[in-house]
Image: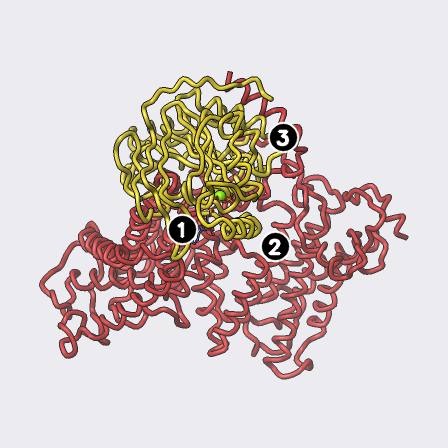
Chain colours: A red, B yellow
């Protein structure tokens, strides 16, 4: 039986003696199971899974999918596509360029995961398996088939079952180089991916109940993982690298398009909060990701910006209630105030290294919150109104355009939050520009050098204190800028959100987590991390006090399996870029080199 | 062995002058009252048993350590003990334990070396005026020239961490050269290299000297040092024992004794105790972290 597998021409892997499936099914049967299972899974969503609409999403209808069934449907279709690709169907080969099994197994697992999650959630929510219609059982069985099929595909077996299983989820070692595409096709690919991305993202934000969000996460995680193991993400990032500014433009176009896809301003509110959170995370990324300075009190700079804007924007409760700056002036004042605080905090502390800096910034963050809490005229000067904060910050007016009111644009109604969302897109664009330009310059290189090896960096002539202070101050100013908008979005500023850790973002711990999870030193990483970290507590409210626990577990899992963050830095990717160059025989390198040197020396 | 018997054209303009440099770590005097001069166009070797204080002396020269006593001057001006100002002044160095920026590319490593010779700050990076672009381009060109000189141009986009050991050492030299130094300090540039690579490094050091850069190098490979150096100084127990041409130093029996651990007449310090310490240092220090 193993013989048949090894000699099978389309098996792809170089046939070695010990390739066999984890489950003992012939290759043909395994493939067939994958394909049939994928189709069956997708088809089963057209059946009723439960008899009552008490479970959210209405899964009672025979005839078309609803709620979580859509996710199962999507996963089933993906499994089918990958299965067809593994048959070598023309036009689908690009889905699995390396012809490895991991994408098949992972998409199958995604379908299995979301289906079984749904079925179990129905049983648990409604109290017992009796609440399942036959369709539910059919779906459960159908989604199991592709998993069995995938596990029967031949993989290198080393005798150890755990190692064997690992082979089914690891990325292909060698991904054949893609054929060159015309630039316009590459751009078209980027455009399509952006549109799909926007769709997926919007779906996630718009999920109406926690179960749907969890199902969504299952499908997205397994699908993305599958694409990663297939090598498609690497290919895409190579495309991105080639069309950097085009991708950036598409990204912003997608971001601008988002509010137009929304009918409920509530989701635009989530959007604007994600943007604020993401912008601040990106600012923190300069400090942590580029310069390698662990700042545990970063949210205080957001607070400084927000409070400054609140004080000068004409709120009647402000100490300077007469002052009403236009937005640009308030934004600059907020950023400048944060900058000044950044320098004041940085100047004495940046001479410290590592842990000491972390502790001092942690302290500063708390001092800010406590100070603001106490400056109410009783225990301190009357500046910030203490715990009551500064309420009724008027809405912004830009060019006669009141951001507080709904506007109709080309048939779309943009509510208040959608307006602020668009303003935040602009601010984020500025921050992204600042980040990318600063990172790719003499100063950016010296930040990275300091992060890599401070002693060597100073020995190369870098004034460590100076460049660290610049990073710190720049990061602070960007957070302050975001803070000025956030003050207007929320109408009021109060001390409580600006703490080190809490169950909702933004707080310093969440900001740091967003940077680390998303991928340090990248642009997209912290934004993605921020979106994820904002949505998790927002959507998982039904877990109540257990949400932080679930959240913690999720973080640990992510850091265990992808320590470099969701989006790996180019540098980290480069680690795998050179093919086995460490194995280059010493002598060959040497003869090359001595020749060059002799020539140079002559 | 090699044909390069170095010409002793002593251009006696001193580049580096260390006066009475002493470095104490608590009770331990790692460097004791060392006077030292490197002249323009010279290659000077610094040898001594493990733990003799050679690296410590380098650290004092480059401002990584603030010497307990003494001054270091470069071309007549006294250097402040700040590493970045020392580099700015014109002294560049490599490290005994390679200290590249591991997650930066080969080219970026060299570009960082150009830090002191470029000015573009944050504002010009953000505004990206024509001046910025010109400076970046010039920096890149200069760095690529150096990479070609060193023979690593074809690996410009590789991560430093992925280079083989010998190439990492070379890259460190290129990075140091990028700061356009007048004096290059090399701390054991051939450590861990095979004979072939050592030969290549020898040629490289001559080529660097021919660019008009004085070189001071620490080395344990005696053949390498004596081949290269116009002058060799021997550091034992933190003190400068002998200084002179290769022939003089090679013939000096105190040096042989210091390396072999035999007592001899006129030896500085408490003989026995020193020997034991040196032997101990040999086993421990050789593995220890160097700054
Ligand atoms: N930062 C430090 N603190 C305390 N002692 C130190 C420090 N740096 C060096 N020393 C001590 O100074 C002495 C000289 O060390 P150094 O590294 O300069 O020797 P070396 O001549 O470079 O030896 P090697 O040939 O092994 O590199 C050693 O005894 C070492 O332990
Ligand atoms: Mg040493």
The circle on residue A225 is 2
- The chain containing the residue under callout 2 comes to A
Under 8 Å from ligand 1: the CB of mark 2?
A: no
Q: Say if mark 3 contacts mark 2, CB within 8 Å.
A: no
Q: Position of residue B226 (x, y in %)?
A: 53, 27
Residue drawn where x is 54% and y is 28% of the image: B201
- Mark 3 vs mark 2: in front: 3
Q: Position of residue A123 (x, y in %)?
A: 64, 79
Residue drawn where x is 29% and y is 47% of the image: A466
Disc 1: CA contacts within 10 A as few (<14), some (14-19) or many (>=20): some
Considering the numbered disc 1 on the image, is that residue within a helix, a strand or a loop?
strand
Q: Are marks 1 and 2 on the same chain?
A: no
Judge whether residue A196 can be spotted in this image. Answer: no
Q: Say if mark 3 contacts mark 1, CB within 8 Å.
A: no
- Mark 3 vs mark 1: in front: 1
The residues bearing labels 3 and 1 have C-alpha atoms spaced at a distance of 35 Å
- The outermost residue toward the bottom is A127
Residue drawn where x is 55% and y is 67% of the image: A214
Quick check: A162 left or right of B222? right
Judging by the rendered image, the residue that carries numbered circle 3 is B195
The residues bearing labels 1 and 2 have C-alpha atoms spaced at a distance of 58 Å
Considering the numbered disc 3 on the image, is that residue within a helix, a strand or a loop?
helix
Is A384 above or below relative to B203? Answer: below
The residues bearing labels 3 and 2 have C-alpha atoms spaced at a distance of 48 Å
Q: Say if mark 1 contacts mark 2, CB within 8 Å.
A: no
Q: Position of residue A502 (x, y in %)?
A: 39, 72
Judge whether residue A381 can be spotted in this image. Answer: yes
Judging by the rendered image, the residue that carries numbered circle 1 is B29
């Amino acid at each position: 039986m193993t013989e048949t597998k090894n000699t099978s021409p389309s098996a792809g892997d170089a046939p070695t003696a010990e390739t066999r499936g984890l489950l003992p099914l012939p290759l043909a049967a395994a493939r067939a199971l994958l394909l049939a299972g994928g189709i069956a899974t997708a088809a089963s969503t057209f059946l009723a899974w439960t008899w009552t609409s008490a479970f959210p999403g209405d899964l009672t209808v025979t005839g078309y999918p609803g709620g979580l069934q859509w996710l199962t449907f999507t996963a089933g279709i993906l499994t089918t596509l990958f299965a067809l690709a593994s048959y070598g169907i023309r036009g689908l080969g690009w889905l699995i360029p390396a012809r490895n099994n991991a994408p098949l197994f992972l998409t199958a697992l995604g379908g299995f995961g979301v289906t079984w999650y749904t079925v179990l959630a129905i049983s648990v929510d409604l109290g017992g398996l009796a609440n399942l219609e036959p369709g539910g059982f059919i779906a459960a069985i159908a989604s199991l088939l592709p998993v069995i099929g995938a596990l029967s595909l031949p993989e290198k077996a080393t005798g150890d079952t755990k190692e064997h299983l690992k082979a089914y989820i690891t990325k292909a070692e060698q991904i054949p180089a893609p054929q060159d595409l015309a630039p316009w096709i590459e751009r078209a690919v980027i455009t399509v991916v952006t549109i799909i991305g926007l769709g997926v993202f919007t779906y996630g934000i718009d999920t109406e109940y926690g179960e749907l969000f969890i199902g969504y996460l299952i499908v997205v995680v397994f699908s993305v993982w599958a694409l990663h193991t297939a090598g498609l993400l690497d290919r895409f990032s190579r495309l991105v690298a080639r069309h950097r500014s085009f991708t950036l433009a598409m990204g912003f176009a997608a971001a601008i398009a988002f509010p137009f896809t929304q009918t409920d301003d509530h989701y635009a509110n989530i959007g604007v909060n994600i943007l604020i959170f993401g912008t601040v995370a990106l600012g923190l990324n300069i400090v942590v990701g580029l310069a390698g300075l662990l700042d545990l009190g970063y949210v205080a700079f957001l607070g400084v910006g927000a409070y400054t804007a609140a004080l000068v924007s004409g709120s009647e409760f402000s100490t300077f209630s007469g002052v009403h700056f236009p937005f640009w002036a308030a934004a600059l004042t907020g950023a400048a105030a944060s900058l000044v605080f950044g320098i004041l905090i940085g100047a004495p502390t940046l001479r410290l290294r590592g842990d000491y800096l972390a502790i001092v910034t942690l302290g500063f963050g708390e001092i800010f919150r406590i100070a603001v809490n106490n400056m109410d005229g009783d225990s301190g000067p009357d500046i910030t109104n203490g715990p009551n904060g500064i309420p009724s910050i008027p809405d912004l007016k830009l060019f006669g355009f009141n951001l507080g009111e709904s506007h109709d644009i080309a048939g779309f109604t943009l509510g208040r939050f959608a307006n602020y969302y668009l303003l935040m897109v602009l601010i984020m664009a500025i921050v992204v520009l600042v980040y990318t330009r600063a990172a790719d310059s003499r100063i950016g290189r010296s930040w990275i050098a300091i992060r890599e090896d401070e002693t060597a960096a100073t020995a190369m002539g870098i004034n460590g204190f100076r460049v660290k202070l610049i990073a710190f101050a720049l990061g602070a100013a960007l957070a302050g800028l975001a803070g000025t908008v956030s003050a207007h979005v929320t109408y009021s500023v109060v001390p409580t959100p600006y703490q080190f850790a809490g169950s909702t973002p933004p707080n310093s711990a969440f900001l740091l987590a967003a940077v680390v999870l998303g991928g340090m030193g990248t642009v997209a990483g912290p934004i993605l991390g921020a979106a994820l970290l904002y949505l998790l507590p927002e959507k998982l409210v039904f877990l109540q006090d257990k949400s932080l626990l679930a959240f913690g577990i999720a973080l640990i899992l992510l850091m265990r399996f992808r320590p470099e963050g969701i989006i790996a830095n180019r540098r980290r990717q480069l680690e795998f870029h050179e093919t086995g160059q460490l194995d280059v025989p010493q002598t060959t390198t040497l003869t090359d080199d001595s020749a060059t040197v002799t020539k140079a020396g002559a | 062995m090699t044909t390069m018997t170095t010409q002793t054209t002593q251009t006696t303009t001193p580049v580096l002058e260390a006066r009475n440099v002493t470095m104490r770590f608590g009770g331990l005097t790692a460097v004791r009252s060392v006077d030292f001069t490197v002249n323009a166009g010279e290659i000077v070797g610094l040898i001594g048993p493990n733990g003799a204080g050679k690296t410590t002396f380098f650290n004092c020269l480059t401002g990584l350590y603030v010497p307990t006593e003494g001054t270091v001057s470069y071309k007549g001006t006294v250097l402040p003990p700040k590493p970045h100002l020392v580099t700015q002044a014109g002294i560049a160095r490599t490290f005994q334990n390679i200290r590249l920026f591991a997650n930066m590319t080969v080219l970026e490593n060299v570009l960082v070396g150009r830090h002191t010779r470029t000015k573009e700050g944050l504002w010009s990076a953000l505004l990206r005026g024509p001046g910025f672009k010109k400076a970046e381009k010039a920096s890149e060109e200069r760095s690529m020239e150096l990479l070609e000189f060193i023979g690593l141009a074809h690996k410009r986009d590789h991560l430093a961490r992925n280079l083989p050991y010998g190439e990492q050492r070379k890259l460190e030299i290129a990075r140091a050269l990028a700061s356009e130094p007048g004096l290059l300090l090399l701390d054991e540039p051939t450590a861990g290299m095979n004979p072939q690579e050592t030969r290549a490094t020898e040629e490289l050091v001559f080529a660097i000297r021919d660019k008009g850069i004085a070189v001071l190098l620490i080395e344990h490979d005696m053949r390498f040092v004596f081949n290269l150096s116009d002058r060799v100084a021997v550091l034992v127990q933190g003190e400068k024992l002998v200084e002179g041409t290769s022939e003089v130093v090679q013939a000096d029996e105190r040096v042989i004794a210091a390396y072999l651990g035999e007592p001899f007449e006129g030896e500085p310090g408490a003989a026995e105790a020193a020997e034991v310490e040196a032997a101990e240092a040999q086993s421990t220090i050789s593995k220890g972290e160097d700054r």
